[in-house]
Image (cartoon, rainbow, N blue to C red):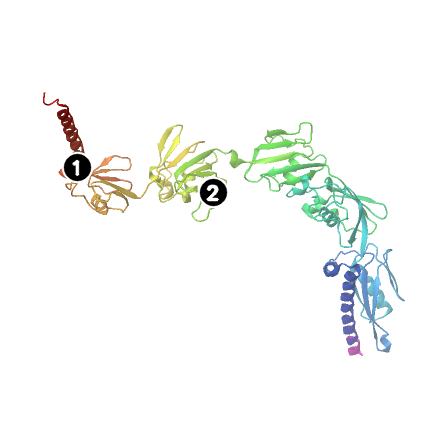
Amino acid sequence: MRYKNFLLLIIILFLAFPISAQQTGTTGAAAGTGSAAVGDDARQLMLALSTADYPATPGDVYNLTYIANMAGGGTAVSVPLTLDAGYQLTIQNMGTVNARNKTYLQVRREVESLVSKSFPLSGPAFTLIRLGRFNVMVSGETAVAGNRSVDGLTRISDLVMDMASVVPVSGGTAAAGNQNSTAVGSNTTPAAAAGSGTTPALSAKASSRRVTVSSAADKETAYDLFQFQRYGTLAQNPYIKPGDRIRILPAGRTIQITGEVFRPGTYELLPGEELESLVTNYADGFTLNADPGRIILSRISTEAAGETRIFDYQGNTGMTLEDRDVITVGNKAITRPAAFFEGALQGTLSGTGKELISGVQETSSDIEGMAKLEYPFYEGETLGNAVRANALRFTASSDLAAAYVIRGGARIPMDLTRYIYYNDFSKDLALENGDIIRIPFLQYFVLVAGAVKAPGRYPYVPDRQADYYINLAGGRDEMKNTGRGETITDMNNRKVKNDVIIEPEMMITVPMNSFIAKFNIYAPVITTVLSLITTTLSILAVTGVLTK
């Protein structure tokens, strides 16, 4: 007998699942909504079964299975049940369960207990197989008042946000101009953005903080959805019940805050909440880059439309704000003093095109590696810190040892290599606003000119003397030079000794001091003078001047 009862339980379980699947699928088909609706119904059913506080809702369909007639060997029974509008669930020949203000789990326990009393050892199983749906009236700040179809899992915020995605029907209020629709981190309900339909849509003035719900017993309760959206307060976002009437009130003061705060956006302030509440409670305070000493208020809602005021946050925390005010919190990096790097440096990391320092501004010339960089700094910051912060911007052409600072027209030589390579800050310099840190170019070539066979610019090679570069230029031109007398000048055009080690940008000039070279220089002049004399004598002879 025990094995037979166990087999009957297995049969009941197999019966329950097909019935559940069949009735769930029939819901979508009957509604004529296709496979997408069937999938939505199935998802909602799974959510309801896994939600401990899912409320029993009129229209819910259940399946009750149990074993009857145990004395006669047992008969598997499967009964579909529907919760009526009075929250009564009637089980034939057993009784009625009142489901009002109860969850599905509570109803299940009562039904299974009732069946067990009527049929001991019957193994009852009570399963939700379809969610009930009902209409709820929505009015107030909607383009068109009307009913919305919801189920027992729908909370107020679900309904409001769903309405926010609906474009108002013809004659409704266009929402494109609603400043709330583009806010980031806003507590106001965004208006319609896309789609179309005949269901109610929110107006541009709809509030998410002033939503009232009137129950079937005409008890009205106000809810603040911001408390749920920000803090997850479920008490401010209850499930919608049959008979509820929802009214969305117009928004009060909506203030936009932008700039250096953690939660920029448009917020609806409650009475008594002013600037400090906006910054602290809604925008979550200033960021590390914020400049509280420079806050901009733009006012557009009063007769002083277009009024702009700049003020310090300290001492103005209680400032009264008006509807549609815009508060902008500045970035202190923009108002900081700045120094400028100029010369042989690059603005971006080679090959990436990305700025190495956030927030800097720069311009580049047509010369490769030539750039100007703005470097905002904090009070007390030194040249050594600025140089190390920009170390990756220096190139092989940057002559750091010859760098200098231009301040007030004066030039202050500074060897920047000590900061980068030697960690020597003994001769550091405090930056001042407007300082120009100029990095000269150091080109790695040597110029060879004069009496050589191929004068020009040649790559620099360390530890070489003048003869090496003269040979690179094809050697001395024997027709022009006697093998001595070259002149060497450094990058500043100062003469140096002929036996020095050649450094970058030095110039080696081999003089043209041979007789032939000098003759070639003066020969054209002599030839021209002799030609003029010959021509003059010829003219005089022809005219007879010489014969007289």
> Which mark, by number, is residue 520?
1
Residue farthest along the left direction in this orientation = 547
In the rendered view, does 7 fall on the left or right side of 477? right
The reply to whether the magenta stretch includes residue 125 is no
Which residue in the protein does label 2 denote?
357
State the image quarter where residue 527 is shown. Answer: top left
The percent position of residue 507, horizontal first and vertical second, equals: 25, 39
* Range of magenta residues: 1-6
Q: Tell me the SS state at disc 2.
A: loop
Instruction: Kindly tell me whether residue 444 is visible in this rendering.
Output: yes
Question: Looking at the image, is mark 1 or mark 2 earlier in the sequence?
Answer: 2
Q: Give the residue type at disc 1.
A: Asn
Q: Is the magenta stretch mostly helix, strand or loop?
A: helix
Contact, mark 1 vs mark 2 (Cβ under 8 Å): no
State the image quarter where residue 345 is shown. Answer: top left
Q: Nearer the viewer, residue 462 or 67?
A: 462
Whole-angstrom CA distance, mark 1 to mark 2, is 60 Å
